[in-house]
Image: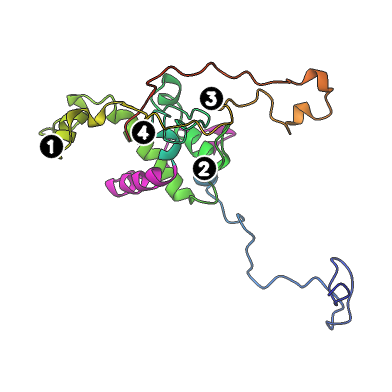
Amino acid sequence: MHDEPKFFPQRGTDFYADGRSVRPQVANTVARNQLHADTYFYTGFVNGKEGDGLPFPVTMKVLERGQERYNIYCTPCHSRVGNGRGMIVDRGYAHAGDYHTARLETAPLGHFFNVITNGYGAMPDYSAQIAPVDRWAIVAYIKALQLSQKATQADVPAGAQVQPLSSIAESQGLPANFAQQWTLPPTAVNGTPDDQPYVLPTTPPNAASGAGAPAASRPATVKTPAAAPAGKTAAQQ
């Protein structure tokens, strides 16, 4: 197999009549991403800045799709209510973004799409797992989720009622405290060697700014927070 016949890029060959090893593209071939004429739909940017709008109308079907995708891909870190305290965060992973902070409540919609597409901090990108249309559906659901945690009677249609989670839990045969914070069992661990929450290094190992810098200028250690007090709590999922 080491000596098997093969084509080398940009070299000639006598296998084809035209003598070219690199074959012409099939007629009407379109390269990947070549037809992304609607740049906002695929990037979330307008003139180099994160846009603030959805590229299609929001319907209940869109929100339901966004909720489904959110529950699959986002809840492990961000939790069902979006407070950034998902289960793997309570097991030691870096704290995820809390959608109910002032910064993210006022963030443009393109920001959320951009983060899902390209990642942010410890969060990897989900461009391979989530199609662009579903990323926008998740963005729409995130905005609905933000509203739901602070909804008032004025935010719902006439005749509808804003119900606290405790009463919804009771209506489904669950205890009222089901929707409240709960205490991790004593067997729970952070999943880190020292059983402490994971802290991101201040400088990534392969950061461009650190490449070639002297070792003395790079942080030698990562400060680990003190042990968490007994009875730490996590958001109800």
Instruction: Report the disc number at residue 171.
Output: 1
Q: Name the quarter where the N terminus is drawn.
A: bottom right
For label 3, the crowd category at 10 Å Cα-Cα, with few meaning under 14, some 14 to 19 and many 20 or more, is some
User: Where is residue 13 drawn, in percent x and y?
Assistant: 88, 77
Q: Amino acid at mark 2?
A: Tyr
Nearer to us: label 3 or label 4:
3
The span from disc 2 to disc 4 (Cα, nearest Å) is 18 Å
Please tell me which residue lies in front, 38 or 145: 145
The span from disc 2 to disc 3 (Cα, nearest Å) is 41 Å
Outermost residue toward the front? Answer: 187
Label located before the other in sequence (3 or 4): 4
- Tag 4 residue: 143
Q: Is 224 placed above or below 179 here?
A: above
Label located before the other in sequence (2 or 3): 2
Label located before the other in sequence (2 or 1): 2
User: Where is residue 65 drawn, in percent x and y?
Assistant: 35, 49
Task: Find the magenta span and give its range.
Answer: 44-73
Image point 76% across, 27% down: which residue?
Answer: 209
Image point 58% across, 35% down: which residue?
Answer: 47
